[in-house]
Image (cartoon, rainbow, N blue to C red):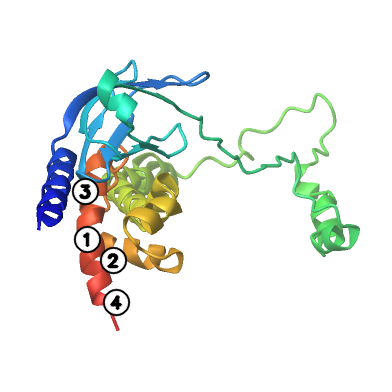
Amino acid sequence: MRSTIFYFFLFAFIFVNAQNRINIEGYLKSKNSEITQIHIFNLQSKKGTISDNNGIFNIKVSKRDTLLISSIQFSTLKYVVTETDLISKKIIIFLKSEATNLEQVVVNSHNLSGSLLLDIKKVPKNFQQHASYKLDLKDINFKAPGLIENPIDKKLPDPLRTSETVNSINLIPIFKMLTSGIRKKIRLKKKYKMRIAKLPKESRINLGDLFFVDNLKISKPLIDDFLIYCQKKGILRLDFKKNKMELIENLFRESKNYLETIKP
């Protein structure tokens, strides 16, 4: 009986101690990149914060809490709080710069493919016809040098045609000017739809697959389906990189609903 009571109070003490989180100060370090606006999220308490321009932050933790550190310019990492951290009330975390791979772009000053057979086919069949110069006899002056042209023979301009030319208006520039606002709205709407369509992929790259698998319990093959599910609910927004803490909290909440919907 006494041993039972002892173990009961022991486990109760451990449980209460785990729930009593203390505020500690964290320092983020990097050798190469500037540290600013880094997101820190406590996976156990589901609370987060953002570092200042010097990489300093404050957050409440308890022993064995896992901190998720993420940003655009650094690789996402996890830090497990130790007893030493709680005693010193300080945490120093070193960040690793995120490598950015750029696609190779080749710029040519010509439109040749490099294949002789393919490039020959691009040459127009009427190339000789277009390249040759057509001699128009009307362009040649057969009059002797110094011969004065008879003003009577010279055809005077038609006053009606001249009037039509002067009074005519080119409507194309006016039409373009009147419809420029509409065309701009169409372009912006198309660009917005393209950015929205890329949100699931960008969110997955930014947070990393381990975040979904380890923390949300979403298996790797279902990550894309889960993000599309969240997108339909309006959780994924274009400003998610600036409000990553809010996004992570929403993903934690919706992951439970999603897992319920896919249960057999």
Query: For the residue carrying disc 4, how many other residues have a C-alpha within 10 Å: few (<14), some (14-19), or many (20+)?
Result: few
* Distance between mark 3 and mark 2 Cα atoms: 16 Å
Q: Is residue 263 above or below residue 147?
A: below
* Distance between mark 4 and mark 2 Cα atoms: 11 Å
Which amino acid lies under the numbered mark 4 shown in the image of this protein?
Ile
Q: Can you see residue 14?
A: yes
* In this rendering, the label closer to the viewer, 4 or 2: 4
Residue assigned mark 4: 262
Which amino acid lies under the numbered mark 2 shown in the image of this protein?
Tyr
Which amino acid lies under the numbered mark 3 shown in the image of this protein?
Glu
The residue shown at (79%, 60%) is 122
Q: Tell me whether the residue at label 1 lies in contact with that at label 4, contact meaning CB atoms closer than 8 angstroms.
A: no
Which amino acid lies under the numbered mark 1 shown in the image of this protein?
Glu
What SS does tag 4 mark? loop
Hey, which residue is sitting farthest right in the picture?
116
Q: Is residue 166 above or below residue 145?
A: below
* In this rendering, the label closer to the viewer, 1 or 2: 1
Q: From the viewer's perspective, tell me whether residue 31 is left or right of residue 239.
A: right
Residue 94: which disc?
A: none
- Give the mark, 3 or 2, whose residue is nearer the N terminus: 2
Residue 207 image point, x, y percent = 39, 47
Q: Is residue 60 above or below residue 200?
A: above
What SS does tag 2 mark? helix
Quarter containing the N terminus: bottom left
